[in-house]
């Protein structure tokens, strides 16, 4: 059997609290209930339990440190003494029987503090908090912006109802308490963490808590100004296009952006205008432009040609 200090991964100067913490951590990792049918994990757990049993006993620990007993608790023979491998002092790996293991666990966890929240060694049933689990959920842009309830299908055939808070962002983690793996020995269940992946929208873009959208306008609307309908994450609203607007003109709709859950404030929506010409032939427009002489002629490519 290995050195009990090495088995638990602690220094030889470790305190009782450090030994208890190391044992609980390893017990949760290798406990047979977590690895049904895994003989290697069961053997490792027995080694960990036997090491903790020896080091929790102050007298046994003193005698082991002094070289009077070995890692199994057996007396070390004098230097000249030799014992056959099957003699009375032959080392045993862990516990001689499942009954001995059960008796140790009953004494080691009696106070129910093996749930990983501190405490020393007691007796009673082994209790451990269930493992946390992480899932991914793909979400439409508007569902993330507005909030929604979605059903997440789990690999084992179960489902989770996930409430999406308004203003959720890409990569955000949602925590569902008690929806992870079940606990052991009456311990609490773990939590489920849902990582959100927001799909791209055809025309909305989000930057921080602001929403950006490019809106096409006609030549007449841009030149003469107009009142037009534009989309927002909450639905269409009316917007005034100023006279003489051009492609790239940006207008702001206050508090039409995404919700900041920390401050409770909403961002803004920025509307960038994009001038588009008529799809069909406009003879009257073409005839007008043939004779039109701008009062303020300019070359829009001047900066590029310098």
Image (cartoon, rainbow, N blue to C red):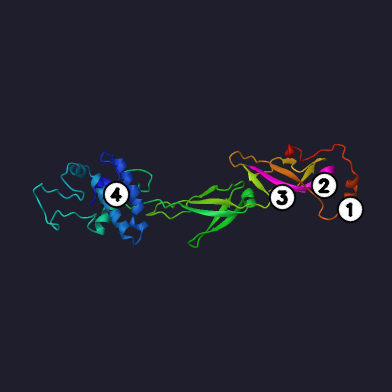
Q: In the rendered structure, are the residues bearing label 1 and label 4 in contact, judged by CB atoms less than 8 Å apart?
A: no
Farthest residue toward the front?
306
User: Of 192 and 65, which appears nearest the observer?
Assistant: 65
Q: Secondary structure at mark 1?
A: helix
Q: For mark 3, what is the residue?
A: 235
Residue 108 shows which numbered tag?
4
Please tell me which residue is depicted at 52% across the width and 51% down the height of the picture: 194
Residues at circles 3 and 2 in contact by the CB criterion of under 8 Å: no
Indicate yes or no whether the magenta region holds residue 215: yes
Decide which of tag 3 and tag 2 comes sooner along the chain. 2
Discs 2/1, front: 1
Q: Secondary structure at mark 3?
A: loop
The part of the chain drawn in magenta is 209-231
Question: Which label's residue is closer to the chain start, 2 or 4?
Answer: 4
Query: Which element type, helix, strand or loop, lies under badge 4?
Result: helix
Q: Quadrant of residue 268?
A: top right
Q: Which residue is mark 2?
A: 219
Q: Which residue is mark 1?
A: 283
**Residue mark closest to the camera, 3 vs 4:** 3
Say which label, 2 or 1, has the lower sequence index: 2
Q: Nearer the viewer, mark 1 or mark 3?
A: 1
Q: CA distance from mark 3 to mark 2?
A: 25 Å
Q: What kind of element bears circle 2? A: helix
Mark closest to the chain's N terminus, 3 or 4: 4
Q: Nearer the viewer, residue 42 or 281?
A: 281
Left or right of residue 293, residue 267 in this image: left
Q: Residues within 10 Å of mark 2 (few under 14, many from 20)?
A: some
The Cα–Cα distance between marks 1 and 3, rounded to whole angstroms, is 36 Å
């Amino acid at each position: 059997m290995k050195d009990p200090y090495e088995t638990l991964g602690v220094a030889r100067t470790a305190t009782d609290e450090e030994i208890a913490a190391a044992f609980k951590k390893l017990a949760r990792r290798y406990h047979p209930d977590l690895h049904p049918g895994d003989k290697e994990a069961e053997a490792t757990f027995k080694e960990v339990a036997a090491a903790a049993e020896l080091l929790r006993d102050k007298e046994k620990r003193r005698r082991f440190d002094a070289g009077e007993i070995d890692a199994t608790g057996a007396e070390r023979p004098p230097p000249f003494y030799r014992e056959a491998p099957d003699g009375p002092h032959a080392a045993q790996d862990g516990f001689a029987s499942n009954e001995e293991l059960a008796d140790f666990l009953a004494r080691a966890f009696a106070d129910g503090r093996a749930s990983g929240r501190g405490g020393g060694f007691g007796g009673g049933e082994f209790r451990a908090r269930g493992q946390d689990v992480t899932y991914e959920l793909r979400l439409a842009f508007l569902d993330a912006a507005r909030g929604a309830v979605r059903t997440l299908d789990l690999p084992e055939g179960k489902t989770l109802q996930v409430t999406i808070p308004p203003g959720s962002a890409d990569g955000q983690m949602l925590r569902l308490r008690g929806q992870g793996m079940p606990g052991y020995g009456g311990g609490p269940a773990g939590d489920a963490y849902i990582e959100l992946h927001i799909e791209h929208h055809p025309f909305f873009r989000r930057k921080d808590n602001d929403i950006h959208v490019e809106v096409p306008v006609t030549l007449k609307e841009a030149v003469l100004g107009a009142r037009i309908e534009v989309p927002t994450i909450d639905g269409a609203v009316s917007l005034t296009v100023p006279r003489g607007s051009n492609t790239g003109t940006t207008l702001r709709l206050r508090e039409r952006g995404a919700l900041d859950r920390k401050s409770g404030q909403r961002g803004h929506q920025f509307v960038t205008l994009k001038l588009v010409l008529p799809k069909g032939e406009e003879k009257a427009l073409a005839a007008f432009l043939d004779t039109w002489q701008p009062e303020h002629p300019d070359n829009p490519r001047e900066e590029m040609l310098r």
